[in-house]
Image (cartoon, rainbow, N blue to C red):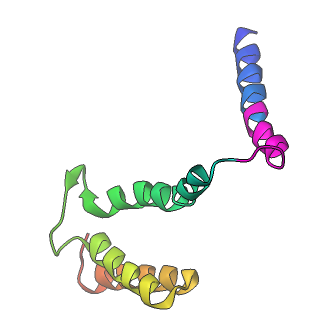
């Protein structure tokens, strides 16, 4: 029974935290510096998720030319920079990764 009470309380707290931001969105004015800083949060979070997967292989840092993920990631960054198109970036990056893996047998 304690487990269900704990799970319910954690769920209610999570719901309350998320609801507070929605309920206060129109009433609370953030300083302009905070709003400027919050614009960089999605980029920082995405970078923190993606970069380790590109540069680590089997738990070790791998910056070699044999790292297919790193090469595909660099090419995808170039595609994103030039095209500013998310779908084209995803298709191009995955296409390069598959070509490197299957044609050149890179890990």
Rendering coords of residue 35 (x, y %)? 61, 54
> In the drawing, does residue 12 fall left or right of residue 36?
right
Q: Using the image, determine if residue 35 lies above or below residue 19.
A: below
Which residue is at the far top? 2
Rendering coords of residue 63 (x, y %)? 18, 66
> Which image quarter: residue 18?
top right
Pick the residue in front: 78 or 56. 78
- Report the residue at 25% width, 58% height from top: 57
Quadrant housing the N terminus: top right
Pick the residue in front: 70 or 48. 48
Which residue is at the far bottom? 83
Tally of marks? 0
- Report the residue at 35% width, 74% height from top: 73
Q: Using the image, determine if residue 50 lies above or below residue 94.
A: above
Q: Using the image, determine if residue 82 lies above or below residue 8.
A: below
Q: Is residue 18 magenta?
A: yes
Q: Mostly what secondary structure, the magenta segment?
A: helix
- Report the residue at 43% width, 90% height from top: 82
Pick the residue in front: 94 or 24. 24
Quadrant housing the C terminus: bottom left
> In the drawing, does residue 45 fall left or right of residue 15?
left
> Which image quarter: residue 51?
bottom left
Q: Using the image, determine if residue 89 lies above or below residue 49.
A: below
Rendering coords of residue 42 (x, y %)? 54, 59
Range covered by the magenta-colored residues? 16-29
> Which image quarter: residue 49?
bottom left
Q: Does the magenta stretch include residue 73?
A: no
- Report the residue at 41% width, 54% height from top: 48
Rendering coords of residue 56 (x, y %)? 26, 57
């Amino acid at each position: 029974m304690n487990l269900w009470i704990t799970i319910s309380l954690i769920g209610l707290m999570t719901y309350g935290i998320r609801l507070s931001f929605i309920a206060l969105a129109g009433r609370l004015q953030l300083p302009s510096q905070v709003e400027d800083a919050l614009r960089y949060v999605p980029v920082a979070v995405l970078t923190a998720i993606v970069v380790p997967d590109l540069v680590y292989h089997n738990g070790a840092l791998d910056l070699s030319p044999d790292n297919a993920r790193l090469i595909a990631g660099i090419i995808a960054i170039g595609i994103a920079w030039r095209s500013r198109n998310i779908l084209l970036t995803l298709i191009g990056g995955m296409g390069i990764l598959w070509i490197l893996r299957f044609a050149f047998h890179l890990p």
